[in-house]
Amino acid sequence: MKRRWSGVLSLAIATALTVSLTACGSSAGNSETTANAESTTAQTKEETQAQSETQPTENGEPVTLRFAWWGGDSRHEATLNAIDLYQKKHPNVTIEGEYQGYDGYYEKMMTTLSSGTAPDLFQFSRDWIADVQEAKHYIADLSKLPVDLTTLKKDTIEKSGMYNGEPVMFPVSVGGQVLYVNTEFASRFGIDLTKDLTWEDLKELGTKVHQQDPESYLMTADIDVLNRLIVLEYIAQQTGKSLVDQDTYEMNFTQDQMKESLQNILDLYATNTLEPFGEAAVFVGQMDQNNKWVTGKIGMLLDNTGSAPKYESSISSDIDVMKIPVQDKAVSSGVDFSSNMGFCINDNSKAKEEAAKFLDFLQNDPEAIEILQTTRGYCPTEIAETTLEDKGMLDQVQKKAVALSQPDSYTINTISSNTELETIRKDVIQEVIYGDMTPEEGAKSIVDQYTEVLSTLKAEK
């Protein structure tokens, strides 16, 4: 996969040189993890530090592990506390946390992996696995390391952590997508929270809200939500499948279906259901910080179930959840129910065994589970759910969200999450929104570009 990897690496290096990995917008991936765009690294050594400084610990010799993740303040604090506990239990181990917001993380990881300076253990997105593993075996096979995968809920790793028959990512959450609702807003505008909405219902509500209060909008959405949580879900409701067939590399959607999906976005703006795109763009990756959401002028947000805690803490009103809107005669809910985030081990690490032991501690040790709680999403393991339930630590909104999102769902496959395909859609969506393309022209552009990219990917398979 040389052509694809060189493109990814060029993007990473260009981003690093031109914007120093600062926050300028959210990369492709789940919205759940975009809480804090400002980097807040701590205990971080130069990334050029030689991996040879880390050593095996079979004899209790000193070892230093580097551990990278993205997130917001609550995740950072909990993870640092878990690190402290592990170091107390294992005095010979020093763990250097390298943490930041979501923006720039993808580019940083691609650069460090390709240059041989990646951390020993790192948080990763399911959508990025193919980008690195098809270039080189950068991520270790967890089945060959001392980490217990049997604690994961049924099919979790099969759906979200496997690549080419190897378990390469330990999922850290399970869930799908829901509508988060400000209950005071819903009461003010007479929104029935028990009703399952269609897209047409949503547009009617959006029109009603904006007519009653021209400063208010029913929803807001950044480019990632439009791309992953509206366009994809709209098409999956028609097909019940991922965008691309994993075996044949053929598209599972028609040009007309993509046209309908793009038209749906235009309709959401035309009915004033969605806050204007330009206003929402100020809060890309940070919808919880949108001024209109915080002040009660936006009532709903479409996002992953793992985002419940940040939305609960962002406003004074109580939060409730609803199923995402569906089409009439939908063949599936359109919800991607899986784990889109997890922990991976650097296959070039000199301390893979120790990194695996630390990973196992984070995910399977009850004390660590109590510390981390659901800062990365809802419990992927039975032991996590039991531990937190027994301690009264489960976020009930999040628990409800996961339950709502699972029925009639599907799981996006690896090829459909390819970053080139993601970028194509995002670019076209924005051109359609700005009127540079019609939905019909946009759909044709996506199909034409997909055909070219998929032909190349299939040839390189």
Image (spheres, rainbow, N blue to C red):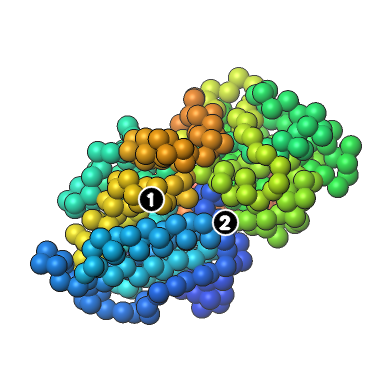
Reading the image, the residue beneath label 2 is 35
Across and down, in percent, residue 394 comes to: 48, 39
- From the viewer's perspective, is residue 69 above or below residue 44? above
Query: Is there CB contact under 8 Å for labels 1 and 2?
Result: no
Amino acid type assigned to the residue bearing label 2 in the image: Ala
Left or right? Give the position of 225 relative to 150. right
Q: CA distance from mark 1 to mark 2?
A: 17 Å
Mark 2 lies on a secondary structure that is loop
Whichever of labels 1 and 2 marks the residue nearer the N terminus, that label is 2
Quadrant of image for the N terminus: bottom left
Q: Residue, x 51% and y 78% (percent of image)?
A: 17
Residue 266 image label? none
Left or right? Give the position of 235 relative to 115. right
The answer to whether one can see residue 253 in this image is no
Reading the image, the residue beneath label 1 is 342
- From the viewer's perspective, is residue 133 above or below residue 18? above
Q: Tell me which corner region of the image, top left, top right, bottom left or bottom right, holds residue 203.
A: top right
Across and down, in percent, residue 58 comes to: 12, 64
Left or right? Give the position of 326 relative to 382. right
Mark 1 lies on a secondary structure that is strand
Left or right? Give the position of 300 relative to 149. right
Across and down, in percent, residue 33 comes to: 52, 53
Q: Residue, x 45% and y 66% (percent of image)?
A: 99
